Image (cartoon, rainbow, N blue to C red):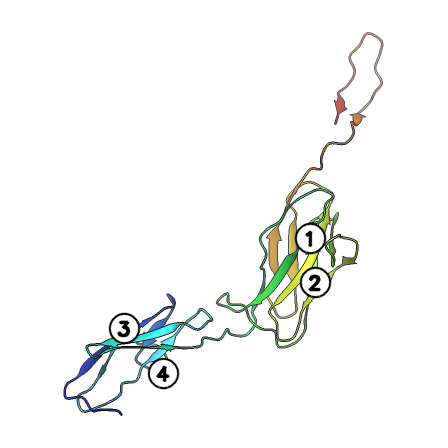
Amino acid sequence: NPSPLSAPLSVSLSSASPQAAFFADAACATLISSRTISAASTTAIFYMSDTVAGSPTLTMSSSLGSVSHAVTVAPTVPYRLVFASAAKTITAGLCSTGVSLQIRDTYDNASVSTATTPIFLSSSSGTLNFYSDASCSTATTQVAVSLGSSTATGFYFNETAAGTPSLAGTAASLLPASQSATVGPATPAVLAFSAASGDFLAGGCSGPLTID
């Protein structure tokens, strides 16, 4: 049962989340690290804010001991798209491994979509194509995040030109996502010959002749 104190009791506040902060007011403006329960009282009120979604453990410690309690921090509304998968490195002409896009809030937490959200795919390269299957046989230009989910997974890409093309995902009302890929040249297969002009006068020197 609650028992009134005979003297003020200072209670230290801490959280397992490094981004958590404690406040004396409901507007979360006055930062504190402890709260004091007054003499003859049984309670003290404080407030908490955190930017990382999850269930961090809150610990309150005093000379009477400590008590812990898990709190739930929910993500805020969808704000932007990000590439959730690492940047890809592929060989020209081969299919990439799976690429995923995710909806996140302003604090970079995964944020659940409140409706099916189409995401349109594009690239800075005119020879890069997107696919819905791991063998890169079914072309696509968009994926979707389903209602109640935050991530669109399972699309792939193929590129024939070596370089570092950028991939992009765009959706209505969300900031777009962008990521660079690295495309290496394919294994040498044939020799090629090129020249600005193969003609020259007898006894003279030709223009540059190139073997690729």
**Relative vertical location of residue 85 with respect to residue 89 in this rendering, above or below:** below
Judge left or right: residue 131 versus residue 147.
right
| Residue located beneath label 1 in the image | 123
Q: Earlier in the sequence, mark 2 or mark 3?
A: 3
Q: What type is the residue that disc 3 sits on?
A: Ser
Q: Are marks 4 and 2 in contact (CB under 8 Å)?
A: no
In whole angstroms, how far apart are the C-alphas of marks 1 and 4? Answer: 47 Å
Q: Quadrant of the N terminus?
A: bottom left
Q: Are marks 1 and 4 in contact (CB under 8 Å)?
A: no
Query: Residue sitting at 26 percent across and 88 percent down?
Result: 43
Q: Quadrant of the C terminus?
A: top right
Give the secondary structure at mark 2.
Answer: strand
Q: Earlier in the sequence, mark 3 or mark 4?
A: 4
In whole angstroms, how far apart are the C-alphas of marks 3 and 1? Answer: 49 Å
Judge left or right: residue 57 versus residue 134.
left
Pinpoint residue 206: horizontal percent, then vertical percent.
Answer: 79, 16
Query: Any mark on residue 26, and which?
Result: 4
Residue at the extreme top: 203
Q: What type is the residue that disc 1 sits on?
A: Ser
Pinpoint residue 78: horizontal percent, then vertical percent.
Answer: 57, 71
Q: What type is the residue that disc 4 sits on?
A: Ala
| Residue located beneath label 3 in the image | 33
Q: Earlier in the sequence, mark 1 or mark 4?
A: 4
Q: Nearer the viewer, mark 3 or mark 1?
A: 3
Give the secondary structure at mark 1.
Answer: strand
Q: Which residue is more in the foreground, 83 or 70?
A: 70
For mark 4, does the 10 Å Cα neighbourhood hold few (<14), some (14 to 19), or many (20 or more) residues? Answer: few
In whole angstroms, how far apart are the C-alphas of marks 2 and 3? Answer: 46 Å
Residue 185 appears in which quarter of the rendering?
top right
